[in-house]
Image (cartoon, grey):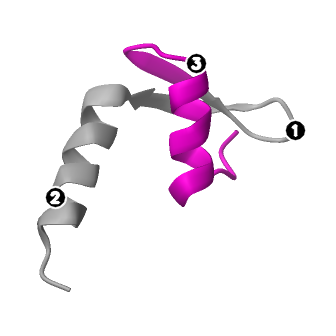
């Protein structure tokens, strides 16, 4: 779902392992494609930021 973010998004990705995900709006309209590699890069970058 295009509305997922943060931990909720990571949980959904872990529950359905794939290299790419079709992102769909609540209306059923296709929003786009999400790459697992892009998510991983963003996560690693976010974790590397000083707190």
Residue 13 colored magenta? yes
Q: Residue at x 33, y 41 (%)?
A: 39
**Residue stretch rendered in magenta on the structure:** 1-22
Left/right of residue 22 with respect to residue 30 in the rendered view: left
Residue on which disc 1 sits? 27
The disc placed on residue 16 is 3
Helix, strand or loop under label 2: helix
Residues at marks 1 and 2, CA–CA distance in whole angstroms: 32 Å
Q: Residue at x 23, y 64 (%)?
A: 46
Of the numbered discs 2 and 3, the one sitting upstream in the chain is 3
* Residue 26 drawn at (x, y percent): 84, 41
**Numbered badge on residue 48:** none
Mark 2 neighbour density, 10 Å: few (under 14) some (14–19) many (20 or more): few
* 3 vs 1, front mark: 3
Q: Earlier in the sequence, mark 3 or mark 1?
A: 3
Side of 35 where 5 appears, left or right: right
Circle 2/circle 3 CB separation < 8 Å:
no
- Depicted 4 relative to depicted 14: above or below: below
Picture layout, residue 23 above or below residue 21: below
Camera-side mark, 1 or 2: 2
The residue at the point 35 percent across, 28 percent down is: 36
Question: Which part of the image, by quadrant, shows the N terminus?
Answer: top right
Q: Quadrant of residue 35?
A: top left
Tell me the CA gap for discs 2 and 3. 23 Å
* Callout 3–callout 1 Cβ contact below 8 Å: no
**Which sits earlier in the primary sequence, circle 1 or circle 2?**
1
Question: SS at mark 1?
Answer: loop
Q: CA distance from mark 3 to mark 1?
A: 21 Å
């Amino acid at each position: 779902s295009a509305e997922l973010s943060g931990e909720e998004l990571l949980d959904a990705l872990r529950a359905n392992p794939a290299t790419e995900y079709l992102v769909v709006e609540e209306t059923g309209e296709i929003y786009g494609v999400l790459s697992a590699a892009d998510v991983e890069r963003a996560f690693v970058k976010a974790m590397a930021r000083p707190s």
